[in-house]
Image (tube, grey):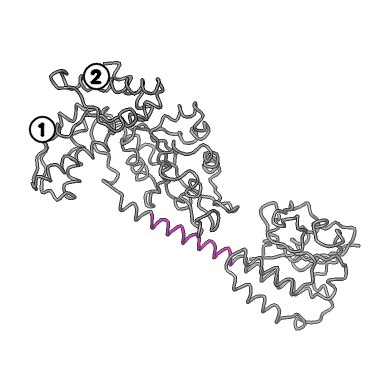
Amino acid sequence: MDPVVNPTRMCHIDSMSQVPARALIRSAVELASRHNRDAVLDTILGELERLVPFDTASVMLCDGDWLNVVAGRGFRRDTDARTLRFARGKSPRLDRALAARDTLRFTDPNEPDPFDGLTQGKLDHLHSCMAAPMRLDGAAIGLITADAHDKARFDEVHAEVLELFAALAAVAIRNADQVTELEHSRARLQGEVQTLAQEIRTVSGGTEIVGESAQVRALRDEIGLVGATDTTVLILGETGTGKELVARGLHSASARRERPLIRFDASAVAPALVEAELYGHVKGAFTGALASRPGRFEVADGSTLFIDEVGELPLEVQPRLLRALQEHEIERVGETKVRRFDVRILAATNRDLAAEVRAGRFRADLFHRLAVYPIQVPALRERRADLGPLVDHFTRKLAPRLHLVSVKVDPGFLEVLADYDWPGNVRELENTVERALVRARTLGRKAVRLDAEAARSLGLGVATVPAAGRGRRAVAPAAAELGPLREATDRFQRGMIDAALAASAGNLAAAARSLGLDRSNLLRLRARLRSR
């Protein structure tokens, strides 16, 4: 027996007046009062149960070459209806129903039903099925199906009921999705507002890289070259060299500069929360997730995401980041919905990532994905010619904050600074200048002069050994024993390094930690001291 397909009417009715309009109006009101997809789907099944006496029912939505069951009732307890999906073109009943303009009823007992064996009840085989396409703007977006074990169950059901109900359901699903998208957009805008507020609080000196040394000029050229593209950039450099400033320069040189640069500091987030911060989360995804929240990727959509201290990312979260970078899509924590994004990635680290890869602490594929265009930011000791411009920049920046009317910098001040290796780089220099200004300010003067004596009083060249020295400062011998300051500083640093290595039984990583240095920085410093 072929399926009953009557394009005009399936039941013996003569006019629309026989359709239970009151019940449909109630369904329309109920559906209109639901504003998210889960609630809408639950209401669709609840209202359908009042209208059609089914044993099993489903709501199915098209997804490319598949029909996915997004809600269902009457399935076996060991069957999660939402995991069911059917390939289009390979399920005759569903294909015909999806192509139809009206409700179809199937009663052929020899034709398999897609849900045979999955329903509750004594009989696994279904004997009657009704299906109506849900359409929007003339295109089918899915189906509403109702099945029964009794082949006569739907004899008294009007075809128009399911047809009109399917139309109401389609509109309700679309409206719910639009509300969700609006909420997502609002959350994203709120995130951008928060980020912009943070940017206003933390911006210092814009994107200008101060200095005219050959190294800084080459760095500016690189920023201009790659900044105008969407190429992923890995910014390398010691702590305090200005890697974030380079990231800001790259963003400002790009076509995305009208939108805010979004920053994520991998070293400042607990490992368990990294994924929630990057990809967002839904309400209830974990303890403390009191509301849904977009992640950095969503907030940065259409802009640039700067992942600072990327070398600190836990190994277990790296595969998901790699997938996000490859596929340009994410899923919020606790959610299965895929969200696509258009984000340019900039990353920075003070670690030797190649060494981290060899040690098994960083994925090689992620490293190569990030290092499409590496930029090395020079250390301050490699561009000592920029000390003058940098000190001038910092005094102009800090003087108003310290209520100083004027600051004069003597050449002697810069000469003393030039004899120091600046392991903390530009950040350490800024702190040193501020300390010098504060010391002058405490004397009650509004106009101050920074000279050689002021520089020597800052104690440059005195190191601290947190592990071996238990926080005690290691002070150099008397000046009469030393000779030139540079040679004395080198001898002092060699002694500190030798002591740290001895205390750590030759373990470079442990020695670096005890000295407050990165392992790669210690290796470079050790090699330089040996060459002198």
Where does the N terminus fall, quadrant-wise?
bottom right
Label 2 crowd (10 A; few <14 / some 14-19 / many >=20): some
Q: Give residue 3's quadrant in the image.
A: bottom right
Residue 442, percent from left and from top:
12, 45
Q: Is residue 140 above or below residue 324?
A: below
Magenta-highlighted residues: 175-194
Residue drawn at x 69%, y 65% as measured from the top left: 134
In magenta segment, residue 178: yes
The numbered dot on residue 271 is none
Quickly name the residue at label 2.
Answer: 491
Quickly name the residue at label 1.
Answer: 453
Prevailing secondary structure class for the magenta stretch in the rendered image: helix
**Tag count:** 2
Extreme top residue here?
531
Residue 179, percent from left and from top:
54, 65
Extreme bottom residue here?
17
Determine the secondary structure under disc 1: helix
Residue drawn at x 55%, y 47% as measured from the top left: 329
Q: Is residue 329 above or below residue 222?
A: below
Q: Is residue 30 above or below residue 67?
A: below
Circle 2: residue type: Arg
Left or right: residue 111 versus residue 399 is right
